[in-house]
Amino acid sequence: MSAASSIALKQDMPNTSSASDVLEELKGRFGPPNAGNPGGPMGLVQKTADDLPTQWVSRNRVRDVLRYLKLEAERPYRMLYDLTAIDERTRAHRNDQPPSRFTVIYHLLSFERNADVRLKVALTETDLHMPTITDIWSAANWYEREVWDMFGIVFDGHPHLRRILLPPWWQGHSLRKEHPARATEMEPFHLSEEKEEAEQETLRFHPEEWGMRRAHDGTDFMFLNLGPNHPSVHGVFRIVLQLDGEEIIDAVPEIGFHHRGAEKMGERQSWHTYIPYTDRIDYLGGVMNNLPYVLAVEKLAGIEVPDRVKVMRVMMAEFFRVASHLVFYGTFTQDLGALSPVFFMFTDRERVFDVVEAICGGRMHPSWYRIGGVAQDLPNGWDRMVRDFLDYMPARLDEYDKIALGNRILKARTRGVGSYSTDEAIEWGVTGPNLRACGFEWDFRKARPYSGYDQFEFDVPTGEHGDCYDRCAVRAEEIRQSLRIIEQCLENMPAGAHKADHPLTTPPLRKPTLQDIETLIDHFLGVSWGPVIPPGEAFVGIEATKGNNGYYLISDGNTMAYRVRIRTPSFPHLQMIPLISRGLMISDLIAILGSIDFVMADVDR
């Protein structure tokens, strides 16, 4: 470990709690279904393919249940991991669920239990109202706005319920089933001069709507629009800053400029053809984005992949972690005024892509993972290329620590800037390196191993202060840990097939097609339409490059998903910007934005 780094390396992880514990706890606290309690808060317990405890709760008592789980339970569920909804109106397979036209879903995470719980609330089509929980979880603000934007479900008591991903002039709610999914289903686009002026007027910022007040009597607001097109906001992202001189009084992040309906597209693509779309979520994460999606589909289908597939997936995922962190490292130092590192680090990223291209056939978006395996086996000579990279990279990292983390200007610009505590991070839904920079050692590869990560030896870097410097130092050390994992993949690559022997793998296995016409027809349908995944629900989250990236998939027994929910890490991370930037200077905000490490496609989907 470099002397320039301020991180510690730890390995102990909490034990995973029994999934049924929380359901029994809720039953004991609120009573079983139909127990005569006023309002009957606890409904059915739903069985899901992911075995995540799923409890239906009545709308008039959901706040009580959520408050209990966060604040009163002995081992609380302190993180609101996700909040979303489902349009159930055209869903056929709901035999084990209560009647519901729309369903609101709360996904909570407990670090003390190392366990999750999913709460569901059924709504009728004529009464799409829910109580807000923004007073229970700060992170609920953006999630509730998104559910209203996408589904039209109103959260009573929300401080500022307005569109967040779609523009203010948008008509309808795009994740409802009646909303078109393709441009060909809509009228040809036409923008008249009058419409353009009206739409531009809706983008005008009105500070009073956000509860802003003038700093002093007799003074006016002083605002600065940072973005939506500015190098320091790392994408199409707007922050409206209220200033007193150069001091930030308040900040209003505005997202949605990069929204392209990634979840909606999941309802129109086959299970197989949706894989390339996942590459574009965190567009610096490459095949890392494929992993939670294919793992969730495999959980729905009951597919167990060979050990060789697991190790190949881990190896390529870690290569993309290295590539993504190099982009972060270089652009972060560039934001702070150091120009040389970004050229060096992007050059080394190209070396990563040389290996990726040789193995996967593509560079940034190879879409290499498949349901049940990977696209093809490792090519001849892959081990030599990987070994050459492993021999080359460590010395480069040592040099980077000297010119970046060891640079006194970078230290002065980042230490003590944009810091937050572990409790604040959990409150706002922060995961990944940004959480570990606070000193909390939590890595999903260790805490909840997937794809065979429990077979690898690596350390979990943590910081101490949760500031910009520690967020950078954690990622710099994570590159070294990724190299350790890649080396173990190189030295211990199992023999075997690169695809599971299962009828729902994609593309399906070719050998049976030569037996008779029926198997040939099955193969043709499997290639053209894709597999028919059994009805069910499954969620899988992984330790992606920027935090926890998860896919919650619902199958209605068809060749495409009924609902695709993408829980991305950057969405809650950006919601923290006002909290950690108030009272600082504009130059400090630039350091904060770079240290968060986000891409807007990951935020907007």
Image (cartoon, rainbow, N blue to C red):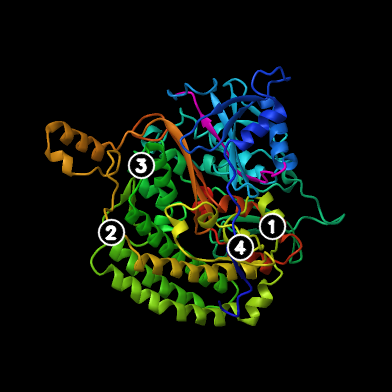
**Proximity of marks 3 and 4: CB atoms separated by less than 8 Å:** no
The circle on residue 504 is none
Q: Alpha carbon of mark 3 to alpha carbon of mark 4: how far?
A: 40 Å
User: Which residue position is annotated with label 3?
Assistant: 303
Q: Give the residue type that dot 1 points to.
A: Thr
| Callout 3 secondary element | loop
User: Which residue position is annotated with label 4?
Assistant: 593
Q: Alpha carbon of mark 3 to alpha carbon of mark 2: how far?
A: 19 Å
Residue 156 visible in the displayed image: no
Q: Give the residue type that dot 3 points to.
A: Ile
User: Which residue position is annotated with label 1?
Assistant: 422
From the viewer's side, name the closer residue of 125 and 429. Answer: 429
Residue drawn at 75 percent across, 40 percent down = 72
Q: Alpha carbon of mark 4 to alpha carbon of mark 2: how far?
A: 44 Å
Q: Residues within 10 Å of mark 1 (few under 14, many from 20)?
A: some
Q: Give the residue type that dot 4 points to.
A: Leu
